[in-house]
Amino acid sequence: MFLKNVWYVAAWSNEVGRKLLSRQICEQPILLYRKQDGSPVAIGNMCPHRFAPLGRGKLIDDTVQCSYHGLRFGPDGRCVLNPHADGQIPGKMKVRSYPVAERHDMIWLWLGEPNEADQSAIPDFSCNTDPNFRRIDGVFEVRANYELVTDNLLDLTHAEFVHEGVLSSEAITSSKLQTHQAGSTIWSNRWCPTGDASPAWKVAFNNYDKPVDQWLYMRWDAPAHMLLDVGLTPVGKTRRDGIWLYGTDVLTPKDAFTTYYFWGFARNYEIHNPAVDDFWRSSIKLAFEDQDKPIIEAQQQMMGRRTVSELNPVMIAADTAATRARRTLEKLLQEERPGAVLRSQAEPPLSLLRKHVDSRVPVQPVV
Amino acid sequence: MFLKNVWYVAAWSNEVGRKLLSRQICEQPILLYRKQDGSPVAIGNMCPHRFAPLGRGKLIDDTVQCSYHGLRFGPDGRCVLNPHADGQIPGKMKVRSYPVAERHDMIWLWLGEPNEADQSAIPDFSCNTDPNFRRIDGVFEVRANYELVTDNLLDLTHAEFVHEGVLSSEAITSSKLQTHQAGSTIWSNRWCPTGDASPAWKVAFNNYDKPVDQWLYMRWDAPAHMLLDVGLTPVGKTRRDGIWLYGTDVLTPKDAFTTYYFWGFARNYEIHNPAVDDFWRSSIKLAFEDQDKPIIEAQQQMMGRRTVSELNPVMIAADTAATRARRTLEKLLQEERPGAVLRSQAEPPLSLLRKHVDSRVPVQPVV
Amino acid sequence: MFLKNVWYVAAWSNEVGRKLLSRQICEQPILLYRKQDGSPVAIGNMCPHRFAPLGRGKLIDDTVQCSYHGLRFGPDGRCVLNPHADGQIPGKMKVRSYPVAERHDMIWLWLGEPNEADQSAIPDFSCNTDPNFRRIDGVFEVRANYELVTDNLLDLTHAEFVHEGVLSSEAITSSKLQTHQAGSTIWSNRWCPTGDASPAWKVAFNNYDKPVDQWLYMRWDAPAHMLLDVGLTPVGKTRRDGIWLYGTDVLTPKDAFTTYYFWGFARNYEIHNPAVDDFWRSSIKLAFEDQDKPIIEAQQQMMGRRTVSELNPVMIAADTAATRARRTLEKLLQEERPGAVLRSQAEPPLSLLRKHVDSRVPVQPVV
């Protein structure tokens, strides 16, 4: 049901520290923490002795002490201390240890065979650590299958209805949705020249009320790693004359009906202004938590335990990207075998950006 | 599990208007509203595009706009607007449209084949719209299978125990329960001459404290359409000398373990006195919500997911009507086939009444 | 899944009286009350007529009147009154009646064949009624399988971690755990000479701060009847010089994932001092409700519906007693057949005590 040979985001870097963090990734109980040297660790969260959650325990140096009987486990998952009686440690007294990588301010976790964990397969979200950007981030827990959230993110036509009066604009609505695919990477692009900005963006752009060029470019990599490039600029101008941001939209299945939604907004303007942080933070809360999340969860409730394909949905043109992603994922799941690691086909967004920040490309879509 | 070729009550007329009303009838998600001309509409509540509940959307003229992607559906269930891109509407983009009829101040919905929806098969509840009666009504949601609620309503012997001090009286308890059947219509009649009124009825009858003749006649049609004729009069007198009311007790399965109970009380006395409305409203709240509902839901909890017949109940004489209804329903379910529409065998209560209001019949039971 | 030919504790004696008490024992709905002569009764709690829980009804003399239709059932489970119509009572109108015994201030219930209910098979908990002891008691409902609670009670090595700063002490931690078995009775003994008392016991022993000899002896009988003998005395002294108590730890499955934990503490010191009652009552609340219960319930949540053996636990030496109990129980379940009644092999604790209260035995373990 879940791809194994991919990197999943388990947490934002700032969520993991010297306090134990329990997560469930693709139905597997995971425990996250940092060693004294700062490096992140992900091990199984279920004690092999009596199945207590290790996350209720204590971090002692680089080891985790179970809160029930005090067995201690190291970063490699092996039991390193049995405090009882003879102190003998059976060879099987260990939890799984997961390869992790800290990249783009996120903790990535590999569910597949450890020796196939190739960090070069991590999709590029380098906007999150670039000093020229200011990022805000967070995580939502959504009571819906992760593909329903993907549908929501890849199909920006819902803005007009779900986000009416906030993120909707006639120029966006009437723009054409273009879908591209290279390997398993998919883009869903909306290029919206010469129109009114949506209300939220108008405020963000100092209440600029002349026509603007707007863009919403969404990149998808399997299973649900999305990067949104969204912004506006005065008509005919370059990015440097406008404002824009990169949105991290990475979904990690908790289980078949629950999803962690790791979101980030890395903007290129007023990067030292906390009021702008607050503006976007409350916009996101409004747009996702109050608008998208309820409808997605209502969708899942309506579907019950049935999948989208069991329900045989009727498609419209706006579904092209979401349907491609769904089919690509289905194919990858069917064909998955050890040793085959997915790689994003996308040129890193920042290198693309730097090449073109003063030109009309990539204001207009590159792919 | 549910009869199809019957009319189900989906709502009281006063519940349906220019605001979308979501109901679930026999496990099917249903959306109810009125067109601009006032006529009621029932369509499927699950958008065929991405399965969002249409009930979260907006009513625009006679159409419903989905709150997610803005597809609009007409009263016949067909998509009439796709606001995106080319605006093309696939032929399959439609929800089911259900035949509805507004009769006796209730919205009746047909679950079977639309071309077999014969409104003459709707049982007679004309007391609800007769200007000589004053009606109060409402709907309860009961967390129990609808047949358990039928048992409760058809077997009035529980009054003495469940409604002790409110609706119980020695005269009712000691009266004989008579069961009749014509076609699939069943009556469960209690004729209780010369006795004390139950406490609630004594209050209703101006604290009359001489002996009265009382009656409780319950009519049942499949699957769970009941009409109660209940009242009292001084001993030996006609209806005109007493007070009485018609109780609508119509049960519609939400699912196997949840039931909508549409109740109405149409009384023939003090029809312009709101204090009497309040009296009966609080009596019903006390009798059903505080007394019947908890015991019925406790029954269901005790049964878990097992059915009554799986549990092999031990019968007593008082169960005759309930058992007949249960068996009649079982037989109808087994024999159900397209084209066979059930019809109530009962003479309409008002015509029956008008013939006899000044005689001892139907104070004493007709059937 | 549950042993049948054993006595289960259904309640403490003080819980059962002239008020109906509903319990669920091994998934069976049970109703408990006392007859007018004070003797306890246990009958099925589901009315055979319409499956209402009898526990919502009324106790009338020695019979229970169902709150729904007023059928009355006697202590032998037979219906003794049908208040309706002809009043006939079908022969099948009865609920099961369970053999019960009141012993050691507990109500014991026999789930197996009634004619095999041999009260001599009830394990000895006579400390609970001995006038030389003062008992406090109660019942917890734990959302975990009863064997997980047995694990917790039989394996006292968790004290150091779960009860750190309350019931832990270096002397206990470093003591050897000795396991004995006779028939199906198992002992798990910790004899901890010359060490510091745990914080709670130090307070109990008038803040005595010299080294003490401590003991924790736990006796287990199937399916989960445990008696703890725990205390301390100045080094080298007898019991008479110290303080100790008997802990009743009897587990009764409500269902596969819920357990009644009947606990009692019968102490031999300051038996007329209510402040000591309060001290132990709050210590138990802290130790079990705030410390053991959360970790046991977290264990069950981690396991979901999987059993311990399905999860293939990795053992350590400290698990010896718990593992023996688990295997003994599994064997008893496999071999259970009518007529084979389990009997505790243990010498009654009080007779053992009286023989030795002034010697070093049984301060040091007898078995």
Image (cartoon, coloured by chain):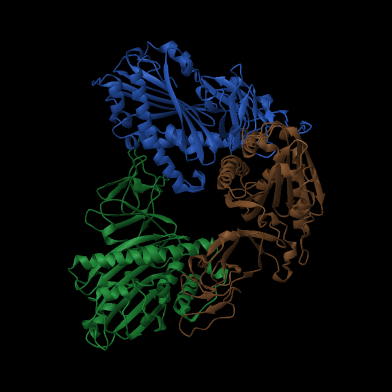
Chain colours: A brown, B blue, C green
Q: Quadrant of the N terminus of chain B?
A: top right
State the image quarter where residue B168 is shown.
Answer: top left
Q: Nearer the viewer, residue A327 or C137?
A: A327
At x 70%, y 57%, the residue is A126
Q: Nearer the viewer, residue A145 or C360?
A: A145
Vertical placement of A180 versus B317: above or below? below
Q: Quadrant of the C terminus of chain B?
A: top left
Place of residue C138 in the rendered image (x, y in percent of width and height, measured from the top left): 31, 62
Vertical placement of B246 versus A329: above or below? above
Q: Nearer the viewer, residue A282 or C334?
A: A282
Place of residue B103 in the rendered image (x, y in percent of width and height, measured from the top left): 55, 19
Residue C351 seen from this side: yes
Horizontal placement of B131 versus B253: left or right? left
Q: Residue furthest left?
A: C272
At x 39%, y 30%, the residue is B177
Place of residue A318 in the rendered image (x, y in percent of width and height, measured from the top left): 75, 38
Vertical placement of C351 versus C103: above or below? below
Vertical placement of A134 versus C235: above or below? above
Place of residue C77 in the rendered image (x, y in percent of width and height, measured from the top left): 35, 52
Residue C8 seen from this side: no
Horizontal placement of B88 versus B326: left or right? right
Q: Nearer the viewer, residue A146 or C138?
A: A146
Q: What is the count of numbered marks? A: 0
